[in-house]
Structure formats: C-alpha cells, structure tokens
Image: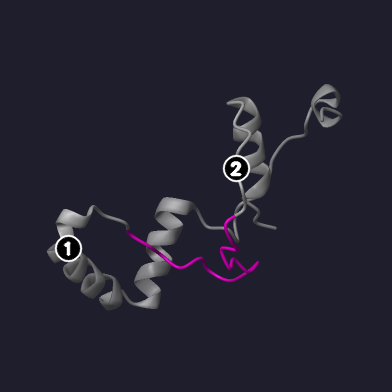
Amino acid sequence: MFDLMPVVNYIADQRQVTNLKVGGDLGIVEGKPIPLHIGMRKGLAPLAGILEKAMKAVTDDELKVLREKWLGDSDKQQVKGKLRADFRHRP
C-alpha cells in the first residue's frame, strides 16, 4: 500500500506543524503507476512545451526502464531483516 499521510503526519509532528489541511486526493491507486509530473517557474514557460513534448515521446518500455533505474524495481524489492522488538512497539 502506498500512502503519503503517515509520512506527512510524521514530518509535521517532528517539525511541530499544526496548521496543515488535506487539500485533496492524489488519485494514487495501488498497483497502478503514478503519473509523472514536472513543475517549473512561470518565467520558464517556453521550456514547458518542450518538456511536455519530450515526456509524450517516452515509450512505455522506456518509462519502465527509467522507473526501475530511479525508483527501483518494485517487483524485486523485498524487505530484508527484522525490526528489533523495541522498534516494533513504538507508537
């Protein structure tokens, strides 16, 4: 299961941020690839069209290779080792 809320909650707690609100749903579905997005400054508008065209030109096979290189092959990832007993019971 892929879920960002535990990460957000942890960081907010660590940094004592108390005024966060959920602004929407990312639309992430388990087992389905997360769409790629690129953000840039407003002053770089000409670059946006170039990058959009380049992203559309990437084939599914090329995208798979890029995901495996930068994010790891999720089919092959396995958690190795065990948590110590004192870590298992922490809130």
Indicate the amino acid at tag 2: Leu
**Hey, which residue is sitting farthest front in the picture?**
19
Q: Judging from the image, what secondary structure is the residue with disc 1 in?
A: helix
Q: Nearer the viewer, mark 2 or mark 1?
A: 2
Left or right, 1 with respect to 4, comes to right
Q: Which residue is mark 1?
A: 45
Image position of 14 with respect to 62: above or below: above
Read off the residue under disc 2. Answer: 20
Tell me what residue is drawn at x 52 percent, y 57 percent. Answer: 73
Image-based side of 22 in relation to 87, left or right: left
Q: Secondary structure at mark 2?
A: loop
Q: Which x, y percent locates residue 43?
A: 15, 55
Q: Which residues are magenta?
A: 23-38
In the displayed structure, 51 sits above or below 91; it is: below
The residue at the point 82 percent across, 30 percent down is 91
Does label 2 or label 1 sit earlier along the sequence? 2
